[in-house]
Amino acid sequence: MRITREIAERVVATRIEDLAPDVVDYASTLAMSAFGAMVSGHRCTAGAETINYVRRHGGEPQATVLGADFKSSVELAGLANGTFAHATEYEDDSFPEAVSSYTLFPPLFALAEHLGSPGSRIIEAFVAGYEVQARIGLACREARRIGYMVLSLAGSIGVAAGAAKLLGLNAEKTAHAMSIAASQASGVGYQTGSVAHILEMGFSARNGVAAAYMAAEGMTGQLDVLEAPRGLMNMITGGKVENPENILVDWGAPYRIFEVGIKFYPCCFHLQRLIEATLDLKKERGLSADDLEKISVEVNAFFPTVVQHSEPRDEIEAQFSLPHSLAIAMLDDVVGPEGFSEERINDRRFRAFRPKVETIVREDWGWAPTGWTARMTFTLKGGEVVVREPTHSRGHPPDLLSFDECIEKFRGCVDGLLPDERIRRSIEMLRNLKDLPNACDLIAEVATVGAA
C-alpha cells in the first residue's frame, strides 16, 4: 500500500468545485463553532499565560493572536488560537476516530490570514485535512486504548495536510509535510483535566504548520511513514492497525466531517448526553436539586479514563468531572462556562450535591469511546426511581445542526466581547465562507477586541 503518498494526492486533488453543497455548508457551520471559541478562549484557563508566552517569543507579525493586541508568526498564532479554542472545551469532535474540527481551524485561519487566502481555500484545506486525521484515527483506534490523545496526534498530521493545501504544495511535498508532522505527533490521554491537555491542540497547530513550511523548503521524511512496518500507525497501535486499506477505499464516501457533533456544553464530549438527559428530566418533572437522593451512572471501562475527577480542584478538572457537571445541570439555569468556575466548585451547594452522583464502572460493557449507552438511575426522595439511557445529545450525529441552529453557540461565545454589528458581520462572513474574498476580512472583525 502507498497510503502516505496516496493521501497526499487526494489532498492536492480536493477542490471546492467537487465538494457537494452539504459538505461546504457543514464545513461553514463547523468553522463558525470553532471561530467563536477561538475568539473567546483567551478568557479561559491558561489564556493570559499563552498570550505572554507568545508575546515573549515574538516572531514575524503574520497572523493575529485573537484576544490580544499583536500579531505573531503563523506557527505561534496557531498555537495560541488553538489553545484558546481548546480551553473553552467547546471543541466539536467525531467518534470513534476521536479527532476534532477545532484542531484544524485555528492554524488554517492563521495561515489564510497571512496568505490572504479566500474562504473557498480554507474550506478545501479543512475538508481534506479533516479527512486525513479522521481516517488515520479510524485505523488507529487501538492507540486510544494504549493512552494516546489521538485528537492531537492525528491532528498534527491533518494540520500539516491542510496547511500544505493552503500553501499550494504538490503531492510529493504534501506527503513530506505529513511525514515531518508524524515525527512531532503526540498527545497523552491521561492529561485530561490539566493545562497540558489544553495545550495539546495548540501544539498540533504549531507543529503541523511548521511541518508544511519545512516541506515547502525542501525538507523530507519517509514517504511511507504511516503504513511502514515500523511506521507511525503500527507504532502507536502496537501493530494493531485496523483495515488500513479503508483509509483510501472509504475516502470521502462520505466525508468524515458529517460525523462531527457540535457541543453545547463547555466540557468533555462524553458528558454531553448525560448533562442533556439530566436537564430534560429536571424540566419534565420540575425537579430541584433537593428532590434528588442519588444519581447512579453506569458507564463502560473507557469512561473513567477520561472523565476522571470526582472532586475537581480547578476549572479544568471540573470540565472532566461527572459529579460537578450534573451538579451544574441541577443547580444552575444553564450549563455554561460560569458553572465550571472556581466559585461554583467551592460553592457549598455544589460541594453538597457532588457526593450524590455515583459512577458505576461496568467492566462487562467493554472498553470503547463509543458504541455503548450509559444508564442513569435517578433516585428521588421518597423512593421513586427514574431510569434514562441517553444515546446521543443535541447536535450530534445523526441530528446535525444547521448553520442557523449553531448561531446560538457562536453568540454565546462572543456576546460581550464584540460589538453587535461585528458579530452580525462575522456571522454573515462565516455563512458565506466559500465566497469570502480574503480571510483577513473576517479576522479584522475581531482583531484587537478583548485585548489582553
Image: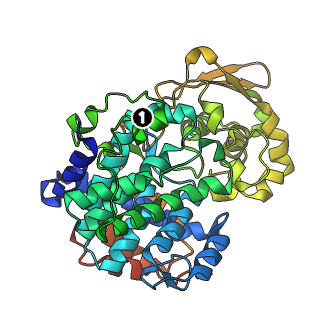
Q: Secondary structure at mark 1?
A: helix
Question: Which residue lies at the image location 40% right of the left edge and 83% below the top edge?
Answer: 444
User: Which class describes the residues within 10 Å of circle 1: few (<14), some (14-19), or many (20+)?
Assistant: many
Q: Which residue position holds label 1?
A: 234
Question: Which residue lies at the image location 28% right of the left edge and 46% below the top edge?
Answer: 4
333 vs 71: above or below: above
Which quadrant would the N terminus be assigned to in this image? Answer: top left
Asked whether the viewer can see residue 105, the reply is: yes
* Kind of residue at disc 1: Asn
Question: Which residue lies at the image location 39% right of the left edge and 53% below the top edge?
Answer: 157
**On the image, which quarter does residue 303 sit in?**
top right
Q: How many marks?
A: 1
Residue 393 coordinates in the image, percent (x, y): 48, 38
Which quadrant would the C terminus be assigned to in this image? Answer: bottom right
Asked whether the viewer can see residue 402, the reply is: no
Q: Nearer the viewer, residue 258 or 427?
A: 258
270 vs 390: above or below: below
Q: Horizontally, is 312 left or right of 93 in the view?
A: right
**On the image, which quarter does residue 230 sit in?**
top left
Residue 207 coordinates in the image, percent (x, y): 46, 62
Question: Which residue lies at the image location 66% right of the left edge and 73% below the top edge?
Answer: 48
Q: Horizontally, is 368 left or right of 196 in the view?
A: left
Q: Horizontally, is 331 left or right of 262 in the view?
A: right
Residue 392 coordinates in the image, percent (x, y): 47, 34
